[in-house]
Image (cartoon, rainbow, N blue to C red):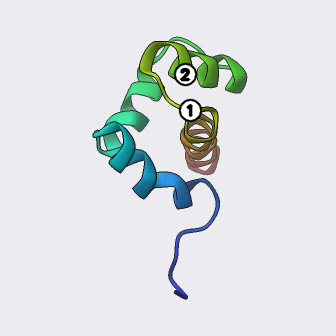
Amino acid sequence: MANAPKGPASYFPSIERTYGRPIAEWLELIRASPLTRHGELVSWLKQEHGLGHGHANALVAHVRAEDAAAG
């Protein structure tokens, strides 16, 4: 498993299986949210969309890392 995803992306297969939505939809949903703080976004995903803490945290961390890398 040399090419296994690391970091937040390692949660993606489980997120798709558990919640039935592709990762691209979750990422788009997070980016469209007016919330900006990591904790606020995690809480929102948990409360409004029923995600578990680890899954919500992984999605938000991934979005923030991608956005930071894009400048």
Residue 2 lies, with reference to residue 56, above or below; the image says below
Residue 28: which quarter of the image? top left
Q: Residue at x 55, y 21 (%)?
A: 46
Residue 67 lies, with reference to residue 7, above or below; the image says above
Looking at the rendered structure, the secondary structure element under dot 1 is loop
Give the crowd class for mark 1: few <14, some 14-19, many >=20 residues within 10 Å.
some
> Label 1, label 2: how many angstroms apart (C-alpha)?
6 Å
Amino acid found under the numbered disc labelled 1 = Gly
Q: Residue at x 39, y 26 (%)?
A: 29
The circle drawn on residue 46 is 2
Spot occupied by residue 36 in the image (x, y as percentages of width and height):
63, 19
Q: Residue at x 56, y 48 (%)?
A: 66
Spot occupied by residue 70 in the image (x, y as percentages of width and height):
56, 48
Q: Residue at x 62, y 25 (%)?
A: 42
Residue 23: which quarter of the image? top left
Give the crowd class for mark 2: few <14, some 14-19, many >=20 residues within 10 Å.
some
Left or right: where does residue 64 sit relative to residue 49? right
Question: Which quarter of the rendered picture does the C terminus lie within?
Answer: top right
Residue 23 lies, with reference to residue 36, above or below; the image says below
Amino acid found under the numbered disc labelled 2 = Lys
Q: Nearer the viewer, residue 17 or 39?
A: 17
Q: Which residue is mark 1?
A: 52
Residue 31 lies, with reference to residue 63, above or below; the image says above
Spot occupied by residue 3 in the image (x, y as percentages of width and height):
50, 82
Proximity of marks 1 and 2: CB atoms separated by less than 8 Å: yes
Sequence-earlier tag: 1 or 2: 2
Spot occupied by residue 51 in the image (x, y as percentages of width and height):
50, 29
